[in-house]
Image (cartoon, rainbow, N blue to C red):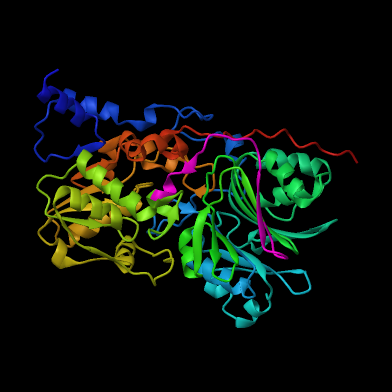
Amino acid sequence: MGMAAAAAATSTSRLLHHHHHHASSAGSNRQHLQNQLRYSAKPSPLALRPGGSGCRLWPKVAALLPDRVSPFSYGEDDQDDHPREECGLVGVVGDPDAASLCYLGLQKLQHRGEEGAGIVAVGGDGKLKSVTGLGLVADVFGDPARLASLPGPAAIGHVRYSTAGAAASLRNVQPFMAGYRFGQVAVAHNGNLVNYQALRNKLEARGSIFNTSSDTEVILHLIATSLSRPLLSRICDACERLAGAYSLLFLTADKLFAVRDPHGFRPLVLGRRRNGAVAFASETCALDLIDATYEREVEPGEVVVVDRRDMSVSSACLVPHRPRRACVFEHIYFALPNSVVFSHAVHERRTAFGRALAEESPAPGADVVIPVPDSGFYAALGFAHASGLEFQQGLIRWHYSGRSFIQPTQAIRDLAVKLKLAPVHGVIRGKSVVVVDDSLVRGTTSSKIVRLLRDAGAREVHMRIASPPVVGSCLYGIDTPSEGELISNRMDLEGVRRQIGSDSLAFLSLDKLHGIYGAEAEGYCDACFSRKYPVLPTLAEPALELED
């Protein structure tokens, strides 16, 4: 094959489609490109419902996911089309202001959960005390008396996003606290157990009574019913029966336990304050805020135990080694750019995604590169540097509007878009604009952004997405749409481009994403892009009905 032919073959393999107002390419080439990019043609390895549009999990499989009715239950007017991280964790032991430090850490992790927050602390009498509430961290602890009611040298905190059916349920807000025959224990969980329903059915058949619809409560029941002793052994026994994603913080009268699942799906890091206090958090940005120096990750399959009586720190292997499968979306979208997640600086990963996207799918003739704020910033910066194009902040996000109400007419809904995202006309008017976003899920946000830029006078709008097409739902603690709602699962690339209305559209290819990570690529979960699920749900046995 000659160099020209090889280059042509390479270009057709890119996840790129450019709309020509005057079609000049041969129909066969267009059909070849569309065939390569039709992601819905390949069935999911999970059980699928045949027929219909897109691919969906069987209802039995969907029912295994706890606390979920419709996993992507945002209103139609909601402008944020990104998947949502469902939880953030903070724990501090060895500081007299442990609860206040947890409060600050949770503020920094607010992006990981905005619908509920809570803190459990150990008082001077050795008793656990809890404060939980619905809303933002600042709202839950707006009354200074609530935080003042949590004195003591150790505390754990949690923020969460809830899904449909549970948004107004205070019972599902963590940390959960329970008593068992050897004392009190509190737990905070980030992740999702794919064998939740199977475990719950067995526990209920043996007499356990559940108060919430959260999979986290299963963990407490497994600990309480374990025959092992001490608590470390009970935790290990419980975790050996769990399948899926979990980063956990446990608090007792004298110890704090930090646990991470054997695959390492969700992040959990350890740091230390100058006074010797030990801190844990989902992201290093929370450690930075409370002046705790980042030391390391809690390793997959590890349990770290901190005894507050002598501040000794010990470590144990939770379960046998399993292949590492860290969530790649932490780097793409969820984590703050000033965090270190899975031992990588997040802003550096996102900049690399943008550079690779520019190399793979450039935008010839474009005048300016702008990010979709805020998570598209570093990817756009990388794209601009690699392309030699001007980088500008062409969209300004308004952070104070809150969730918008259901507007009565389309005209009013379109005006409401401008409340959250406002174009900078001087940057956009008359320009060929490259818009870089971190991901494209349902396509609703992207279509509104394209219309917004055209109304602001953009000559052309070229959409570039710094991740592969999302074609699969997440089973491991991310609130994503059902597969039927994923636009790249329902349409080929040209269909997506037409739907959002851009002049061209390109995604970062999965091969290019893997190339950025090199040998580490196998250690990341990319099931939302590849449908290769590391841990499949466990079908639950039917619950037995007791005779009268």
Q: Is residue 13 left or right of residue 484?
A: left
Q: Nearer the viewer, residue 295 or 447?
A: 295
Give the camera-side residue of 530 and 68. 530
Q: Quadrant of the C terminus?
A: top right
- Residue 208 appears in view: no
Q: Which residue is depicted at the point 77% across and 69% down? A: 127
In terms of depth relative to the viewer, which is nearer, 495 or 391?
391
Q: Position of residue 512 (x, y in %)?
A: 30, 37
> Going 48% across and 41% down the picture, which residue do you hit?
473
Q: Is residue 139 above or below residue 266?
A: below
Name the residue: 54% across, 53% down: 268
Question: Image quarter for residue 165?
Answer: bottom right
Work out whether residue 440 can be spotted: yes
> Residue 216 appears at what percent x and percent y?
66, 51
- Asked whether 27 falls inside the magenta stretch, the response is no
Q: Which residues are magenta?
A: 306-331
Magenta stretch holds residue 329: yes
In the picture, the quarter occupied by the N terminus is: top left
Residue 325 on image: x %, y %:
50, 39
Q: State left or right for residue 384 relative to residue 71.
A: left
Relative horizontal placement of residue 452, taking residue 225 as reference (left or right): left
> Percent from the top left, x then y, of residue 58?
56, 33
The vertical placement of 361 against 417, above or below, is: above
